Image (cartoon, grey):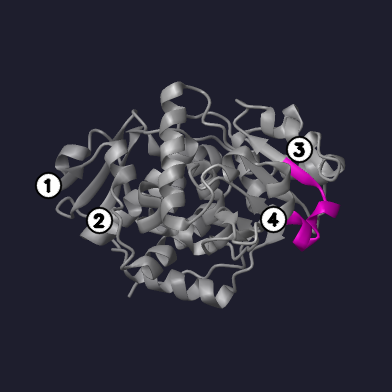
């Protein structure tokens, strides 16, 4: 067995995760012991290389997590080409920044944390057993079977927590040597030093940027809702009655409600601003503090989150909330026989390959 490193309780932007340190340590022990202490040139490698990603931020983050899972299932080690990979820029933009220019320390931390091998283009020919897949193939590989769902959730949430143990605080640079931003900036801007603040986040995803993207997004939402029983429009339109059906029973209409979006369709914000119950509590992140990483953390650490199951960005947020032990995540809802809105699938459904397919 390898030497096991003990982790302190996990906190994100001053807020504690709701997972016990004992439970976390058991998972760390399990997967640390499965990781080889040394990677040789003859070890089987599952390679992430190339600058051609598949999709936007949510797809890239899930693609990295899917690569870790694929390697685990096939007895391989994820290898990432440091100077030629779509994965490292997105990871290090939000997490695991390079501190004080110490690339060797950063490389060691990345390899130890995720049980991967970082290598240069010059080193690559020395490895004798390398499997290559495109970013698209890595993203969609998951299949549609939930036979190993419990273990899949355990492994994925373990690595999501690994990411958040190393979230960027504005210090250091990413793998492209660009200065990183603070993942806590939106939370700090909205609520200052009040780490006990109670608030909700709504993620509005429009699929409106291009006709083909909208068609694909609508089809994806339709497939997910056909499997999970959710309404095929509600999470896209975010009508005020839908939002209030979630927030009112929780007493959350009395607390701030923050909208994050892709900025392509303002109709959701306009509808909510015109609702007399929601409008007084509605908040938008100021432009000076708005960026994707800030949106991610603001949503993950919220008291209540309402998202779109067809959006991989919403999906990453929902998975991260589950990884951190946070509840009140609403992705799958439909009206029941009495016309009332109910959840149609539990929060773990966001990891279901049968329901989510490649978004799992």
Residue 66 or residue 313, whichever sits in front: 313
Q: Pick whichever of labels 3 and 1 is earlier in the sequence.
A: 1
Q: Is 198 one of the magenta-colored residues?
A: no
Circle 2 crowding by C-alpha within 10 Å: few under 14, some 14–19, many from 20? some
Residue 259 on image: x %, y %: 70, 39
Q: CA distance from mark 4 to mark 3?
A: 17 Å
What residue occupies the far front of the structure in this picture? 338
Give the image location of residue 37, x and y in percent.
30, 63
Left or right: 320 as drawn, with respect to 225 = right
What is the total number of numbered labels drawn onto the structure image? Answer: 4
Q: Which residue is mark 4?
A: 304
Residue 39 badge? 2
Which residue is disc 1 drawn over?
128
Name the foreground residue: 233 vs 265. 233
- What segment is highlighted magenta in the picture? 247-258
Tell which residue pokes out farthest to the left in this image.
128
């Amino acid at each position: 067995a390898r030497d096991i490193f003990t982790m302190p309780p996990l906190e994100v932007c001053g807020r504690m995760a709701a997972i016990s340190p004992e439970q976390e340590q058991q998972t760390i022990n399990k997967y640390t012991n499965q990781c080889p202490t040394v990677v040789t040139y003859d070890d089987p490698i599952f390679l992430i290389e190339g600058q051609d990603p598949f999709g936007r931020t949510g797809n890239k983050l899930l693609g990295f997590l899917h690569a870790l899972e694929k390697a685990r299932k096939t007895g391989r080690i994820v290898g990432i080409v440091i100077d030629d990979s779509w994965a490292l820029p997105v990871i290090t933009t939000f997490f695991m920044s390079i501190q004080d220019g110490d690339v060797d320390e950063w490389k060691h931390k990345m390899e130890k944390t995720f049980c991967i091998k970082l290598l240069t283009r010059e080193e690559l020919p020395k490895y004798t057993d390398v499997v290559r897949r495109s970013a698209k193939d890595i993203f969609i590989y998951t299949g549609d079977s939930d036979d190993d769902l419990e273990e899949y959730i355990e492994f994925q949430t373990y690595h999501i927590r690994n990411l958040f143990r190393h979230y960027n605080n504005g210090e250091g640079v990413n793998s492209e040597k660009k200065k990183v931003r603070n993942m806590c900036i939106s939370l700090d801007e909205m609520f200052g030093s009040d780490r006990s603040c109670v608030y909700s986040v709504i993620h509005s995803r429009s699929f409106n940027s291009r006709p083909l993207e909208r068609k694909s997004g609508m089809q994806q939402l339709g497939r997910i809702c056909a499997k999970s029983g959710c309404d095929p429009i509600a999470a896209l339109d975010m009508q005020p009655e839908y939002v209030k059906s979630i927030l009112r029973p929780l007493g959350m209409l009395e607390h701030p409600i923050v909208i994050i979006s892709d900025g392509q369709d303002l109709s959701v914000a306009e509808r909510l601003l015109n609702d007399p119950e929601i409008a007084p509590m509605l908040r938008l992140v100021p432009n000076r503090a708005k960026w994707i990483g800030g949106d991610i953390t603001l949503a993950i650490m919220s008291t209540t989150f309402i998202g779109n199951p067809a959006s991989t960005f919403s999906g990453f947020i929902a998975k991260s909330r589950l990884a951190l032990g946070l509840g009140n995540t609403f992705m799958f809802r439909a009206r029941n026989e009495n016309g009332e809105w109910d959840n149609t699938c539990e929060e773990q459904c966001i990891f279901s390959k049968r329901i989510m397919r490649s978004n799992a």
